[in-house]
Image (spheres, rainbow, N blue to C red):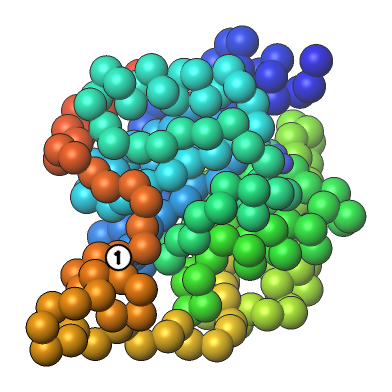
Amino acid sequence: MQFFDRAYEGTPPWEIGRPQAEFMALEQEGEIRGRVLDVGCGTGENALFYAARGHETWAIDFAPLAIQRAREKGSVRAANVRFEVASALELGDLGESFDTVTDCGMFHTFSDEHRPRYSRSLASVLRPGGRLFVLCFSEREPTDWGGPRRVTEPELRATFDDGWKVRWIRAAQFETTQPQVSGHAWMASFERRGPPPPPPPRPSSRGKPVNGRRTGESGSSVRPTSPPRNDRTPRHRSKRAN
Ligand SMILES: C[S@@+](CC[C@H](N)C(=O)[O-])C[C@H]1O[C@@H](n2cnc3c(N)ncnc32)[C@H](O)[C@@H]1O
């Protein structure tokens, strides 16, 4: 059994019972825009938060138990998030495109070989001009407690050096339930380069379909049907270390 499948049989240390503060701050800053995909979503707190804030949201994880828990939470909270079991290295299989992708604590689990695959996979679902946000442990985090790889800023830049623009990389905090974890992290934002999207079809004078589509239609396949509620209750103490 895989590490993550086993982890979700209990409560893993990254499961803080609420969205990570760094992603709540991004949303407040207006950085989370358009259709959102949360990759490596775990049991879905960040995705449920985006939906509660009115964003059309998908979320994927390759651990079936994590997705099962996420769907249960979504159902209890009447939240409109599409949770799917899928690989972050094969995102093109979703057949969808997004304006924002968030990664909270997954990038630092990837090997050197997986990093360029991940970059290409993300590019297959993020629209040109779309934004990626990655929260990962940094090299400032002590290694005495174990945990995943520590990531340096040059490593982040090298992974997203082809087809991406670095918007900014800033020191951040990764919250966990473990007091021995300081949480030193990077929050990195990249923009997908590419040709600008085609202009929207112009309305015809008689309201007939233009460019094969009726005016006012969009290409998106998932529509929120009711505003989701945001009734999270923190269940675990977490630590925001200095
Ligand atoms: C540290 S956990 C973070 C979970 C969640 N983002 C959170 O903040 O609670 C990393 C997550 O990435 C998922 N993951 C790792 N590699 C993956 C891959 N290749 N495809 C999809 N999910 C993956 C794991 O199953 C796990 O849920």
Amino acid type of disc 1? Ser
Q: Position of residue 218 (x, y in %)?
A: 30, 65
In this rendering, is residue 72 above or below 179?
Answer: above
Given the current orientation, which residue lies at the most extreme top position?
Answer: 9
Left or right side of 95 for 237:
left
Left or right side of 15 for 147:
right
Give the residue displayed 44% in from the left and 25% down from the top: 70
Give the residue displayed 19% in from the left and 70% down from the top: 216
SS of the residue under disc 1: loop
In this rendering, is residue 76 above or below 142?
Answer: above
Which residue is tagged 1? 218
In this rendering, is residue 7 above or below 120?
Answer: above
Of the four image quadrants, the one with ligand 1 is top right
Q: Position of residue 160 (x, y in %)?
A: 70, 72
- Count of numbered circles on the image: 1
Left or right side of 33 for 136:
right
Q: Position of residue 15 (x, y in %)?
A: 50, 27
Task: Assess disc 1: are there few (<14), some (14-19) or many (≥20) residues with their C-alpha within 10 Å of its C-alpha.
Answer: few
Q: Position of residue 143 (x, y in %)?
A: 78, 41
Left or right side of 7 for 226:
left
In the image, 175 versus 6, the foreground residue is 6
In the image, 138 versus 35, the foreground residue is 35
Give the residue displayed 24% in from the left and 24% down from the top: 77
Q: Is residue 37 visible?
A: yes
Give the residue displayed 54% in from the left and 39% down from the top: 60
Q: Quadrant of residue 138?
A: bottom right
In this rendering, is residue 27 above or below 106?
Answer: below
Given the current orientation, which residue lies at the most extreme left position?
Answer: 206
Q: Is residue 136 visible?
A: no
In the image, 183 versus 133, the foreground residue is 133
